[in-house]
Structure formats: structure tokens, C-alpha cells
Amino acid sequence: MAETTAPKPRPQREQRFEQRMSDAEALMWNVEKDPWLNPSGGSLIMLDGPLDLDHFTAQLAATVVDVSRLRERVVPGLGRFSPPVWRPDPEFDLGYHVRNVALPSPGDERQLLDLVAAIYQDPYDRTRPLWMFYVIDGLAGGASALVWKIHHTVADGTGAGRLAESFLQSTAKLATPPTVDLPAIVAATRGDAAAEGTAGLVDAVRDALAHTARRQAGIARRAVGEVAMWGADPRRARDTASGLVRAVRQLGGQVSLPNPGGKGTAGTDAVPGGSPLWRTRSRHRRLELLSFSLEEAQAAAKGLGGSLNDWFVTGVVNGCVGYHDERGVPLSTLNTSFVVSTRTDRDIGGNSFTPTRFSAPAGPMEPGERFRVISETMKAKRAGVSGGGALAGLAGVANLLPTSVVTSVARSQAAGMDFATSNLRGARSQLYISGAAVTGNYPFGPLAGTAFNLTTMSYHGSLDMGLFVDPVAVEDPENLRDHLGAAYDQLISIGL
């Protein structure tokens, strides 16, 4: 029962969303037709006990009223001429998006993680809003869990963190959620959709043609205007050429990979271009968890002369090297990526990021030295990202191609990637969800054709990591998890 004397929940900061997908979001929407390239992720939130399901559902009802994107579905554009748009779902059903399940006895961690992997692999109904919550009871010791599954076209990691503020509380006391009439709002939406009728199709055609014209006119206008300035300022042509060269270098640095057939390091039998063990890929997924002290990790990163993200990425590489050493397989490099946020306005929802690829040294090297090299490499790569990054530029072209062509190219590129990483910032203090304390917050990111993804989030003095693995590529995920854990512990010990 809700307590009316409880403190009021934190006000939800307004988050604005565009009604049309960006080119990058449209690309993610298109490539997901190949499950091998699923671009989405989610989070596993561990709770110390059962949450109040009625309170949680009421809180979400208020959230979907305030955040219209959560009750909107994707409406395709006109062919390839314009990106999809978001429109209210006239049949929105909150009960479809919030489900309550229970683990069978004994309710151990392996059962939970296998269920999370199965939930992730269950495809979205693309005619509905693209998010789901699973409240999972029956865990050993009376604990429970909350799985949040959200499509990447709705929000990136930072945007999802903002959305989560609506159902996270700073106290265990239950504040009464705002009273909303969600059925009435959905009914009004249904009436608006029926009134559109044929006019909606006409508007879609007109909108697509206008979007295409603006895109082409903008390109032409910028080109003509630039050339016209060359006569008045001859140095401008040289500067423009230099800018193009920098753009090409940035693009190449973010999307190209070493030649897998090239020569390795002299005097070794290492296979260049990444791991020779992780060449086979599949759509299957397995989840493992790791946690470390945030204070120790930050202190170790500082002691080693870099950032927390440097510590995070170096630990992955060191762990992968240990995994291969145990199997007698030498390496020269590992192909990986990290995410650079391009967000400039925190009130804008959706996606603002670019994945940045690089080859990490994986040959014989002291862990501290590898940390230094990776830190310098990531710093240079990060500095090379400008504007929306290479992903935004590539997406506009890719969206004009047949989906089969795009997914084929994407598979080819992903085949040369060993793993992906992402580092998210979470809350510093203890949080609660509808009366239950959050004891861990484990994000899991998309593999998108790589062998595994390791995503970390800081929460209440801890770094919680979700290791999402393709078990066909990595035959012993538990052993990989153990090597990663040992590598992070080693970096902490030498950095402190």
C-alpha cells in the first residue's frame, strides 16, 4: 500500500525526441532484419527483494504519458527515400510491455542469466513500441530482478539512463505515482489515426519527397557555395582539401580493419587481424557478470597514468590474451571498439554516439605498458571524432542500398572484429525500484556480429559489467569471464 507521507520522487527532466529517425537510427532499424546483427541491448537490475508490481506499473503508466516515445511505434518511410518516422501506437497496451515471470527452483544465477539471454533473443513486435520490462521473481534468498530490454533506435546508453530516472527512487518508501488516464490518451490517439485515413498516405509521400529534396539541395548548396568562395580566397580551396583528407582519415580509422591476410609480427606465429579462435559467429547469446570496486578501479587507472575507460579496455585485452595463452594460441593484435558520445544537448533523446574501432596490441607485453599504449591510441582515436562521427556519414549512403547488400557488408566488417566495449555512467548513491533496493545494475550491449560485448556501468561504488558472448565464437564463456576478472584484479594491484 502506498504511503502518502513518503518523499516525492525526483522530477523527471524533460527529454525531447525527434519524430523522424536519424540516418544512423534508420540503419540500425534496417540491419536488425538479420538477427546476427541485432544492434540493441538492455540491462539486468538486481534487487534485494520483490518490488511492488502495482506501484511499478503505475509509475510506468505516468512515464509513458510524459515520454511519448515510449508509446510510439515505427512507421516506415516511403521506400528508401526517407527514414522511418515515429507515430503514436493506437493500440498501445502497457500490460504487453510489463511482464512478471518466476524462475523454477532453485532460482540460481545461471538460470537467471539464461533467461535474460532468451528474452534478449526474442525479437520485437515491430508494430509496437520497442521496449519491454520483465519482473523476475523466484531467485534464491528471496531476491528478484528486473530486465529492461530497449531497442537501440529508441535510445543509446546515455538516453536509456535518462529514461530510467522515471522509475528509480532514492528511498524505499513508496511515493504515490502521478494519476494519469492512459486509456483515454490511447483512445484519443486511436481517433487521430482513424481521422488521418488516406490523407496520411498523401502526407507520407509529400514528406518523403520533401526530405529527399532537402537532403540533395543541402548537399548541392554547400558545394556550390564552397566553390564560389575559392575565387575570393584561394587558400580556402587548399583548406577544404585538407579538411576532406582529415575526414577520410577519420572515416578510415573508425570503420576499416587490418588485413586478416597480412603478415604478422616478425619471428612469431601469431595470426594477424585478431583472434584465430573467434572466427565463427552465430545469433546465440550467453550472459556472464563481473563486478569491481569503482574506487579501486579509479585509483588504479590514475596510478597507471590514464582514465577509467583506459583501465576498462586494457583489462579486456589483457583478459583475452590470458584466454589465448592458456590455449597456446599467440596473438599480435585484437580488433575492438569503444563508444564516443557525440551528444551536445542532454535534453535531446535518441542516439548521439559513434563506435570507434582500433587494433589493440596483444603480443607479449607487460600489463602496464599495454595500458599506456592503449591509452594513447584511444586518446588519438577520440580526438579524431568530429560532428556525428563516421557512423552518421555512412548511414545516409547505406540506407539507399538494399537491406541484403547492407547486411552482407555489415557481416563482412563485423567478422574482422573480436569484441566491442562500452562504458556507461550510473548513479553514485543507493537507488530503489518500487520498494526494492537495487543491489547491482548490469548492462549488456549488442554484439552486432562480434564475438562478445563487454559493457560496464558505475553504480553506488561498484563497476558492474555485463559480458554478452556468442558461445559459438567463444567456446568457453565462463573461462573468458574468469580471465577478464583476473586481468582487472592484476591492473588494480599494479596501479594502486
Image: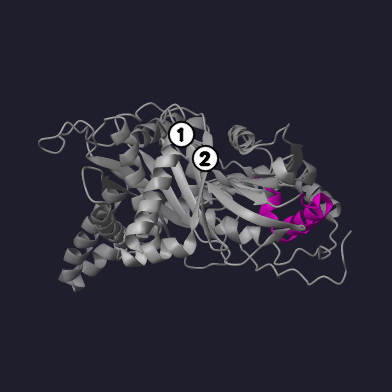
Q: Secondary structure at mark 2?
A: strand
x and y percentages locating residue 193 in the rendered image: 76, 46
Q: Quadrant of residue 133?
A: top right
Q: Say which residue label 1 marks.
A: 477
Asked whether, in this view, residue 398 is left or right of residue 69, the answer is left
Please state the horizontal and vertical placement of residue 293, each as a whole percent of the image.
49, 59
Kind of residue sitting beneath label 2: Glu
Could you say where residue 315 lies in the image, as x and y percent from the top left?
Answer: 36, 50
Left or right of 266 on screen, residue 274 = right
The label on residue 288 is: 2
Figure label count: 2
Q: Is 55 contained in the magenta span?
A: yes
- Mark 2–mark 1 Cα distance, whole angstroms, equals 8 Å
Instruction: Read off the magenta span.
Output: 50-73
Q: Is residue 89 above or below residue 426?
A: above
Q: Residue 375, relative to residue 471: is it above or below? A: below
Residue flagged by tag 1: what amino acid is it?
Answer: Pro
Corner quadrant of residue 415:
top left
Quadrant location, the C terminus:
bottom left
The answer to the question of whether label 2 and label 1 lie on touching residues, with beta carbons closer than 8 A, is yes
Asked if residue 390 shows in the view, the reply is: no
